[in-house]
Amino acid sequence: PQPGGESAPYLPSAWAPTAEFLGLNVAGLRSHAVPDAAVAADSAAYPVLLLSPSGFTPLLLGAIAEELASYGFIVVGVNHT
């Protein structure tokens, strides 16, 4: 992250009802992701990974997306309707 970059909430406020339905208490939880972080200028290209939740809610896959991003992948998440 850039100096002074604040981590994002674990999930957007619009997802609070889904977390409550699943019995997850995410109040005060923060992710390791930094909103609107710039892409590192180390390389001209980075691998892109499309992360599809496959029937799971995306909030359950946040840690996996962060782990993949920490290895240099650009992670694009899909939220199926």
Image (cartoon, rainbow, N blue to C red):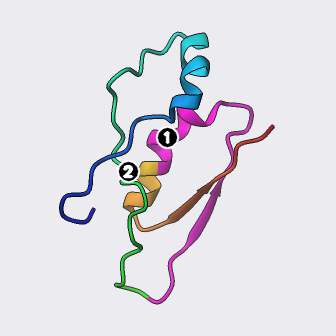
The residue type indicated by label 1 comes to Gly
Residue at image point 58% right, 28% down: 15
Screen quadrant of the C terminus: top right
Question: Viewed as shown, does residue 17 lie left or right of 1?
Answer: right
User: Which of the numbered marks, if any, corresponds to residue 33?
Assistant: 2
Residue at image point 67% right, 31% down: 56
First in sequence: mark 1 or mark 2?
2
Q: CA distance from mark 1 to mark 2?
A: 9 Å
Residue with the mark numbered 1 = 62
In the image, residue 34 lies in the stretch drawn in magenta:
no
- Neighbour tally class for label 1: few under 14, some 14-19, many 20 plus, Cα within 10 Å: some
Q: Nearer the viewer, residue 2 or 64?
A: 2
- Neighbour tally class for label 2: few under 14, some 14-19, many 20 plus, Cα within 10 Å: many
The residue type indicated by label 2 comes to Ala
Residue 63 x, y percent position in the rendering = 44, 41
Residue 51 x, y percent position in the rendering = 63, 52
78 is higher (above) or lower (below) than 45: above
Q: Nearer the viewer, residue 46 or 23?
A: 23
54 is higher (above) or lower (below) than 49: above
Screen quadrant of the N terminus: bottom left
Q: Mark 1 touching mark 2, by CB under 8 A?
A: yes
Q: Please, what secondary structure does the residue beneath circle 2 have?
A: loop
Residue at image point 37% right, 44% down: 8
Residue 14 x, y percent position in the rendering = 58, 30
Question: Viewed as shown, does residue 22 lie left or right of 9?
Answer: right
Q: Quadrant of residue 79?
A: top right
Q: Please, what secondary structure does the residue beneath circle 1 have?
A: helix
- Mark 1 or 2: the one toward you: 2
Magenta-colored span: 44-65
Q: Quadrant of residue 75?
A: bottom right
